[in-house]
Image: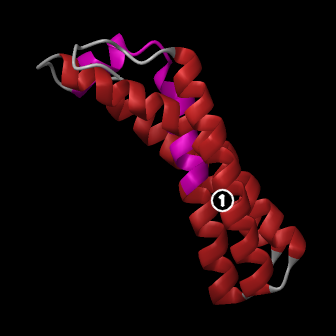
Amino acid sequence: MSSTNAQPSDRALTLLGAGSAVMQTVAFTAVGVLSLESIPYGVVAGGFGGVGAFLFLPWFLGLTAAQEAGDAGLGAAAERVSRSTGPGMLGLGFELGAITVLALGFVTGPDLLLGAASGLVVAVAVYLVGSFVIGR
C-alpha cells in the first residue's frame, strides 16, 4: 500500500484472508493430529481456525486501515470499513473457538463432541459480544 491513506482493495484483503486460512487450517490440524493423535479432532480444530482466519483477517485489516486514515474512534472506523462487522466478529470467535478446541483436547483428551460444542459456544459468544460492542 502506498503512503497515502488509500484503503486496501477487497480482492487483496480476500486473498490475504484465504492465504491465512490455509496456513491456519494446516497448523491447527497438524497440532491436533500430531499432539492429540486424533485425525477428526485435528480436522475440527483446523476447520474452526481456517474459517475464522478467512472471515476475521480481511475485516481486521480493513478496520486498521480505516482507523489509521482518520482520528475517529473504533465505532466510526467500523462504519467506514466496506465489510460488515458481523462476519469479522464471527471469524474472531471461530479462531478463539479453535484455540478452545485444542485446549480442551489437551486437558480432557480428544472428545470430539465436547470440543466442537465448546468451540461453537465460544464462537457465538464472541460474535454476540463483539458485534454489540463494536456496533455502538
In which quadrant of the rendered image does the C terminus lie?
A: top left
Observer-nearest of 1 and 48: 1
Residue visible at 71% across and 56% down?
25
The spot of residue 128 in percent (x, y) is 50, 38
Residue drawn where x is 35% and y is 26% of the image: 63
Name the residue at 22% across, 13% down: 4
Determine whether, in the image, residue 64 is placed left or right of residue 118: left
Residue 120 appears in the picture as rendered: no
Name the residue at 80% across, 77% down.
33
Task: Residue under label 1, please give it.
Answer: 119
Amino acid type, label 1: Gly
- Coordinates of residue 29 in the picture (x, y in percent): 75, 66
Q: Is residue 83 above or below residue 49?
A: above
Chain part drawn in magenta: 74-95
Q: Main SS type for the magenta part?
A: helix
List x then y, in percent, for residue 91. Answer: 57, 41
Q: Is residue 32 among the parts visible in the rendering?
A: yes
